[in-house]
Image: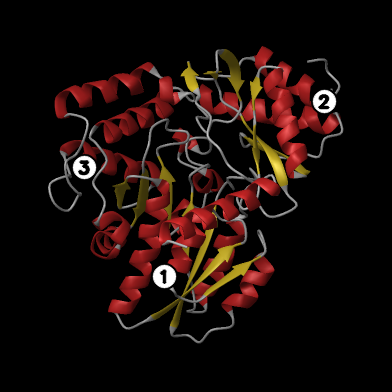
Amino acid sequence: MSDQAGLAHLLTAALDERRRKSLLRRRRVIEPDGSVMVEHEGRRYVNFSSNDYLGLRTHPKVVAAAIEATRAHGTGSGASGLVSGFAPAHASAEAALARWKGTEASILLPSGYQANHAVVQALASSAEAAGGRVRFLLDKLVHASLIDAVRASGLPMRVFPHNGIDKLQRLLEEPDAGELQIVITESIFSMDGDAADLRALVALKRLRERRGRSFVLVVDEAHGSGVYGTDGAGYAAECGVARDIDIFVVTLSKALGSIGGAVCASGDFCAALMNFGRAYIYSTSVPPFVPAAGEAALNVLRSEPHRQARVRALSKRVRETLRAGGIAIAEGDSPIIPIILGSENGAISEANRLMKLGMLVMPIRPPTVPRGSTRLRITLSSEHTDEQIDMLIETLTKPNLPI
């Protein structure tokens, strides 16, 4: 068997196994039609699968800023940020992001995935350069990019149960005083829509600081930024603990409506990331229209707080109504609402039923979520109308609704 034939056999077997388990992933061609509508194969659907929580992707001021920057500077940056790809638009947006998150500095990257990798690389390589040792402690439900980054570092890693503060405290007692402990969590978890217990984490951090054995706290605010806090500054800001967070990771691709990621931290850490974060060093910088759109989105957050209030009110309404209808839904007000179905085939079937009724809700299957927790992941936007929300609730609470 030739190498090419061997590869074809391997790929066919791997994909057939995914197909057999109802885990095979495919893409659909989805054409956006405004902020919450999409078109697929000639039919329009209400989109309940987008992370554009505040409708900023189509906001006139955000779009205008991107167009103006593109006309002035073109569609690309031409180089990495350390060569010639760091323009005034990047510098301005990074300063605005740092002010927004209450940190000394920030750095833009092409994606949140790369931002998380750059953070871990900077921490790992800084420790190596200084002759120190580090260990990573991760909440069980953190984003795959964080798990991938820590695994790639080859450094010691322990996982603690989701929001398991007691277990985390025991883990922190294990190593000797010479090992730097790095605790990593999301603020609003991307698949479950629930919140980290940031107040308890910070209380533990302060307690250990008094004992001279603190830890570094990294918070991925991809799904908390924009939705929570004054001016959308994030869930940590809303909890009043933002100053205790050492490193924030945010994305411009969720509530801010664009693309890219950013790391917000001290000036020293951002300098370390520029020197040790390979995901930043060896990536072409985002085009100037990205920071321009991001900074415009920050301005909209300040001037239009009703968007934030609207999406959280919609979330509370949907959650409360679904619970009253007998569907197991966690309390809270994040725009991410999972309905756990367990069965892959069941989730696919339910998603198809919703599509026939005019709603796009995607099934989320392993390995994105743990086995046995396959779900529909509903996401809400401030731009959804009351009528669209009514339709969603009625469809979910009346499974025998005629198609």
- The reply, left or right, for residue 309 in relation to residue 155 is right
Q: Which residue is mark 1?
A: 153
Residue 193 visible somewhere in the drawing = yes
Residue 332 visible somewhere in the drawing = no
Comparing 337 with 42, the one in front is 42
Q: Which residue is mark 2?
A: 397
> Along the polypeptide, which appears first: circle 2 or circle 1?
1
Residue at image coords 58%, 61%: 201
Q: CA distance from mark 1 to mark 3?
A: 29 Å
| Marks 1,3: beta carbons within 8 A | no
Nearer to us of marks 1 and 3 is 1
Q: Secondary structure at mark 2?
A: helix
Nearer to us of marks 3 and 2 is 2
- The reply, left or right, for residue 92 in relation to residue 199 is left
Q: CA distance from mark 3 to mark 2?
A: 49 Å
Q: Secondary structure at mark 3?
A: helix
| Residue 321: percent from left, percent from top | 79, 27
Residue 91, disc: 3
